[in-house]
Image: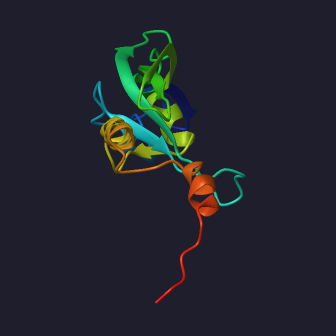
Amino acid sequence: MTWIVDDKGTRWVEVPKRKTRKSPRALRFANIKVGDQLMLKPKPNWHRGIPHYIIVTDLWFDPVAGQENPVAGQMVGYSQITMSGEIRPRKSSTTIRGLASQQYVYADIDYIALCKARSDAMETGEVVGIGAGVNIRKRPKIAGL
C-alpha cells in the first residue's frame, strides 16, 4: 500500500503482492519422510570415492526460521550410516533446503540391507576380505594345463 500524489490529487493505492514460487531446492525433498536414506555422491576430485549415507530420523517445523517463509522452517534430523550398516546414535539437523544445497539425493539402494547382506556373506565365507588375498598368493602354485 502506498500513497500516490499527482495532478489528480492524493490517493491510496494497494500494491499487488508479487507471486512467489517454491525454490527448486525445497522441491527436491518435498515428500521426504522419516526412514528415507539419502546419499552424498562423491565428487570427482575427492580422494575417496565412497558415498556418504544418512538416514532421516526426525522431521519438524521451526517457527522462528519459518516466520517469513514456511519452506525455510522445515527441519530434518538425520544420523549417519556406518560402513557396517549401523546407525550412529548422534543426530544432526539441517533444513530441507540445506540437504538440497549440500548435494544430497535419495539413495539408489537400501544401504543398511546391503551392509547386512555383505556381513552375512562374509560370515558364511561366500565373500572374503581383500586381506585374504595375501594368503591366497602365498599358496604353492600349480602348473597350468
Res 136 quadrant in image: bottom right
Given the current orientation, which residue lies at the most extreme bottom position?
145
For residue 111, above or below residue 11: below
Q: Nearer the viewer, residue 130 or 12?
A: 130
Q: Is residue 92 above or below residue 23?
A: above
Above or below: residue 6 compared with residue 140: above
Indicate the quadrant where residue 20 lies: top left
Residue 85 in percent (x, y) is at: 41, 31
Instruction: Tally the numbered discs.
Output: 0
The residue at 49%/9% (across/down) is 64
Can residue 19 be seen here? The reply is: no
- Between 43 and 49, the one lying in front of the other is 49
Coloration mode: rainbow
Q: Position of residue 113 (x, y in %)?
A: 30, 38
At x 54%, y 76%, the residue is 142
The percent coordinates of residue 10 (x first, y second) are 50, 26
Position in image of residue 77 (x %, y %): 43, 19
The answer to whether one can see residue 92 in this image is yes
* Front one among 101 and 19: 101
- Image-based side of 42 in relation to 100, left or right: right
Q: Residue at x 43, y 12 (%)?
A: 62
The quadrant in which residue 120 appears is top left
- Nearest the viewer among 72 and 8 is 72
